[in-house]
C-alpha cells in the first residue's frame, strides 16, 4: 500500500469516526442509550483499526556465520 493510499484510508477512517460520534450523540439526545452504546462500540473498533501499523518487510543481513541472537535475558527471575 502506498503512502497516498494509507493517508486516504486514514482520513476515511477519521471521517467515519466523526460521523459515528455525531450519530451517537444524537441517539443519546433522543434517549436511545442502547443504540448509542452500539455506535460507541463501532467507534472503538475503528479507533483500534486506525492504530494498527502497516506491515513492512524486514531484511536480516546476518549470514550463517553470524546468526541473529534470539535469546532473551529475564531481568526479573522468578
Image (cartoon, grey):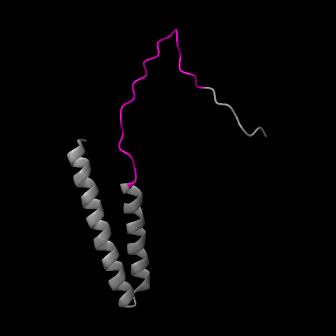
Q: Going by the picture, which residue comes out furthest to the front?
A: 75
**Residue visible at 32% across and 67% down?**
17
Is residue 63 within the magenta segment? Answer: yes
Q: Going by the picture, which residue comes out furthest to the right?
A: 78
Q: Quadrant of the C terminus?
A: top right
**Residue visible at 63% across and 26% down?**
71
**Residue visible at 74% across and 40% down?**
76
Classify residue 12 by image quadrant: bottom left
Viewer-proximal residue among 7 and 44: 7
Q: Position of residue 26 (x, y in %)?
A: 33, 85
Find the magenta span and give its range.
Answer: 51-70
Q: Quadrant of the N terminus?
A: top left
**Residue visible at 32% across and 73% down?**
20
Q: Position of residue 64 (x, y in %)?
A: 50, 10
- Check the image and report above or below for 77 versus 62: below
Q: Position of residue 37 (x, y in %)?
A: 43, 77
Is residue 32 within the magenta segment? Answer: no
- Check the image and report above or below for 74 versus 71: below
Q: Going by the picture, which residue comes out furthest to the top?
A: 65
Query: How many numbered badges does the structure rendering display?
Result: 0
Classify residue 23 by image quadrant: bottom left
Q: Position of residue 69 (x, y in %)?
A: 57, 22
| Principal secondary structure, stretch drawn in magenta | loop
Amino acid at each position: 500500500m502506498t503512502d497516498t493510499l494509507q493517508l486516504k484510508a486514514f482520513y476515511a477512517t477519521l471521517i467515519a469516526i466523526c460521523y459515528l460520534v455525531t450519530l451517537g450523540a444524537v441517539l443519546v439526545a433522543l434517549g436511545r442509550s442502547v443504540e448509542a452504546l452500539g455506535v460507541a462500540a463501532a467507534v472503538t473498533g475503528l479507533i483500534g483499526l486506525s492504530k494498527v501499523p502497516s506491515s513492512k518487510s524486514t531484511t536480516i543481513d546476518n549470514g550463517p556465520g553470524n546468526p541473529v541472537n534470539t535469546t532473551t535475558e529475564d531481568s526479573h527471575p522468578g
